[in-house]
Amino acid sequence: MRNKNNIAILLLLIFSFFITGETNAETRDNHNSSINKSINITRISGSDRYDTSYKIQEFLTKDKFSYYAVFASGEGFSDALSAGILAGEFEAPLILVRKDSIPKVISDNYSRILFGRSYLVGGTNSVSKKVEDEIYKKISVTIRLAGKNRLDTALSIYGPILEKRKELTLGDAYSSYNGYVYADALTAMPYMYQLNKSTMGPLPLLPYAGEGTSIVFGGYNSVPKLENETTRIYGADRYKTAVEIAKAFKSNLNKDIDTIVLASGEDYPDALCAGPLASSKNAAILLTNSKTLNEDTREYIKSNTNIKNIIIVGGEKSISSSVEDELKALR
């Protein structure tokens, strides 16, 4: 009888051991899963838009040398958006300047970096000859790219891009956005970078200019229905449009993204340099309000567990610490 009791106790202990082991293993798996799904959050910001552009330059060039630099006005968004496309193509930093002066944080630091060639995007009404001459003193090969309006300026950046790719001409088709609204163009930029990355003949991203458009970014209030459009990516507002563009990386380009660059959807200054940053990280750009995380942006990040990195662009006036706290609480 005693032997039977001992055997029963032994079997109970063995059973308990396996159950406990499985429970502990499950706990460890859940813990490891939680760790794997956590989000790494980085903020890149300066004291103003010019300092932020310098901080992004530092971030982009900390591990590699950049032969090229791209300069544009920080006092408006149209030329800087085109400059961002050029910077993305050349894997170069986008450096913001004032119309009549180079901010001290820029002049004190860019002269220490041995850029071989720079492009200055925009006419003299955007960036003066005086500033061009100051850049030339430090970077002797400085080329200004400009046109009589924002469309011509946007087209001018494709000269160096075609030269770099050893291609002769652009095709008849292009992609379009509303040239008077910064948000759709900004969020479209890294998508078009990925689309053009491995294709012959880059499809230009231009302010809306007519029926040659094949891809449209933005709703019908931004760009009217076009006869030749094949794809339109848009949502009910700029935040939803940014999310739809992020989704299109997978659905249209078959590309998985693990990084989001988060920019202000309310004002453009800190967001101007987000384009080349996102392109360099194979990332999509999403937008948020300054005080609270936009709900559509939140749901996209929350539902996409492959997103491991979020880079916030801009200081707390653009995107507050409370938004950062909300991001940390998503996983």
Image (spheres, rainbow, N blue to C red):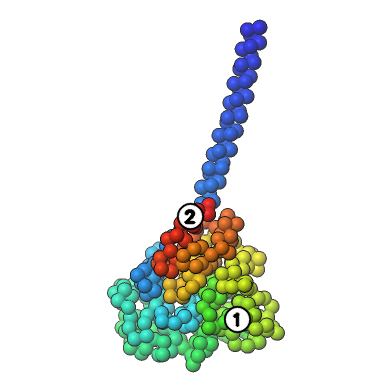
> Please, what secondary structure does the residue beneath circle 1 have?
loop
> Please, what secondary structure does the residue beneath circle 2 have?
helix
Q: Residues within 10 Å of mark 2 (few under 14, many from 20)?
A: few
User: Which amino acid does the dot numbered 1 rest on?
Assistant: Ser
Inter-mark Cα distance, 2 to 1: 34 Å
Asked whether the viewer can see residue 25, the reply is yes
- Between 84 and 286, the one lying in front of the other is 286
Asked whether the viewer can see residue 114, the reply is no
> Extreme front residue here?
291
Residue at coordinates 37% horizontally, 85% vertically from top-left?
A: 99
Q: Quadrant of residue 10?
A: top right
**Is there a contact, CB below 8 Å, between mark 2 and mark 1?**
no
Residue at coordinates 61% horizontally, 16% vertically from top-left?
A: 9
Residue at coordinates 31% horizontally, 73% vertically from top-left?
A: 105
Q: Residues within 10 Å of mark 1 (few under 14, many from 20)?
A: some
Tell me, for residue 157, which label it has, or none.
none
Tell me, for residue 222, which label it has, or none.
1
Q: Position of residue 238 (x, y in %)?
A: 56, 73
- Between 62 and 169, the one lying in front of the other is 62
Q: Position of residue 101 (x, y in %)?
A: 32, 83
- Above or below 229: residue 242: above
Position of the N terminus, as image quadrant, is top right
> Extreme bottom residue here?
148
User: Which amino acid does the dot numbered 2 rest on?
Assistant: Lys
Residue at coordinates 63% horizontally, 88% vertically from top-left?
A: 210
Residue beneath disc 2 = 328
